[in-house]
Amino acid sequence: MTGGSGKERLVDMGRGVRSCSRRVFLKGVSAAAGLGAVGRQVVLGGEAAGVETVEVDATVRYELSPHLYMQFMEPLGTNDSSVEASWDHLRDCWREDLIEATRGLAPGMMRWGGLLCSYYRWREGVGPREKRVPMHNIVWGGIESNQVGTAEFVDFCRKVKADPLMCVNFDSDGRPQFRSAKGRSRSGDAQEAADWAAYCNDPGNAERRGHGISEPLRISHWQLGNETSYSREGFDVETAAKKTVEFARAMRRSDGGIKLIGWGDSGWAPRMAEVAGEYVQYLAFHHMFNPDDRRKPVLAGERYRRDPEATWQVLMDAWKQNDAKIREVRDSVRGREIPLAMTECHFAIPGNNRNDVLRSWTAGVAYARILNNHQRHGDVLKIATAADFCGTRWTVNAVIVGTHPGRVFLMPVGLVMRQYREYLGERAVSVVRTPAGIDAVASRTGDSVYVNLVNTRRNDTVRVQVRVGGKDVIAGKGTMLVDDPCTEISSENCREVMQPREVSFRAGEAIDLPGASVTSVKVEIA
């Protein structure tokens, strides 16, 4: 297999254009070299011209939060039966296959809510299930059974070892369309939020204990307001800031140790910090974006299948929009010591959150670049995500929940987040040198340095040596995700495609980064 260029041959498949030669090549290498342990001098996807250097400065910089790979759960009604499909209604418990998949994902933090919280009344989801009141899901349609509520959500978080984050009903964010439904009030005031904090955290809370839960549920993080600035009919920034103070004071009377997140998007962050900064520990913003050219779209519908190379180029540059959004918010509060929380973030490519390009490995590599960007902003970005959590239909989810047991699988974004979560050190360190086309970030815990490497060259293998502080490493091992960029994951092939592969090397040895690969390594230094 020497002398091959690694370039892909495009073949016609119906109306679309697919790349197949590289997929066949990878299978051939797997059979010959054993991709269960990708090691020294194994070339995957092309011939490497020579050894290049990835140089890491081992000097620690800032602390990295374990909440950079957060997920969030929201009942999405008729749009995507996310929560209802995740609950086993016959056994009154979470589906075991979802729990198992999420434990591997290891999100660090799970958030309850979203737009739903503008009309969510928490007392409808506590107490005996046979007495719980169903609710009309105003935004997402349909009726929610409320069989999954506060205690069930916390139980899920405990099972997957994630910190719970609750979004409170922030007086319906001032939006009149959320204040009532079917003749029932849907707006929650500061006292209702304070009661919720007490229900969860007060050891002696009579209401919770009356429901048979003797020990506190212990929720330390709470978000006040969700996308409050996104509607002209809702609160303005002055009203929202004053309400943030009102809610914070009330909730802290229930528990003085909770951590609160105020809303700071759409240019609100400076004023929110000025008025409510002493009451909140974070400012939140969201980023759902389409990297495509709206005048000449490449990704919309099934167009991405027609030109894989153009699709690759568009998605490889998507991180730039993510970077611009984060910089906009952080620059607006520069000089103020207040961390940021990007509690929702994902692609918003036309297709009602269901564009199938997000099933492709091209999207997986694009998401890796976005996660690298989040880590680069980790000095101020302390809570972040890159996906919705789970559901049956949306492709912006990290996890797809099939209607039958055993049909739960991770989407490409979930596969990358799972890998990155395992290779995150306590503090950031700098990557000071990389070959062209390699996007890398690094972190450190003690004498272990973690490096995440994304090969943004679609076709070409890059052979690299990892050096830390100008010295060869003692040894390294890690995990690689690589596949044909056009491969799309589904419940039928999820155990065959985009499978993690082991990487290992000794001091002085090079490793091969195939085109379109995402590699995470842990290296030991003296």
Image (cartoon, rainbow, N blue to C red):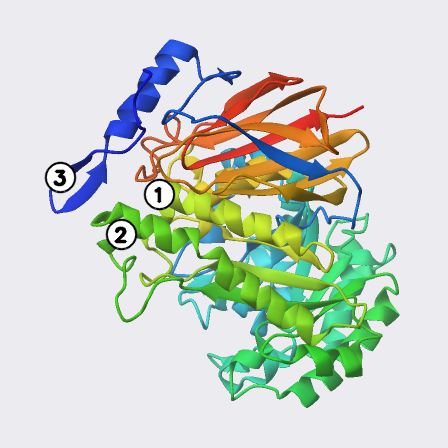
Disc 3 crowd, CA 10 A, few/some/many (<14, 14-19, 20+): few
Q: Position of residue 473 (x, y in %)?
A: 70, 23
Disc 2 crowd, CA 10 A, few/some/many (<14, 14-19, 20+): many
Query: Which type of secondary structure does the marked residue at label 2 adopt?
Result: helix
Give the label on residue 360, or none: 1
Q: Say which of 477 and 83 sits in front.
A: 477
**Is residue 149 something that shows in the picture?**
yes
Disc 2 to disc 1: CB gap under 8 Å: yes
Amino acid on which the number 2 mark rests in the picture: Tyr
33 sits to left or right of 298: right
Disc 3: which residue: 12
- On-image quarter of the C terminus: top right
- Of the residues under marks 2 and 1, which one precedes in the sequence? 2
Disc 2 to disc 3: CB gap under 8 Å: no
Name above or below for residue 477 compared with residue 126. above
Q: Position of residue 177 (x, y in %)?
A: 49, 83
Q: Quadrant of residue 522?
A: top right
**Is residue 185 something that shows in the picture?**
no
Amino acid on which the number 3 mark rests in the picture: Asp
Disc 2: which residue: 304
Cα–Cα gap, marks 1 and 3: 18 Å
Cα–Cα gap, marks 2 and 3: 14 Å
Cα–Cα gap, marks 2 and 1: 10 Å
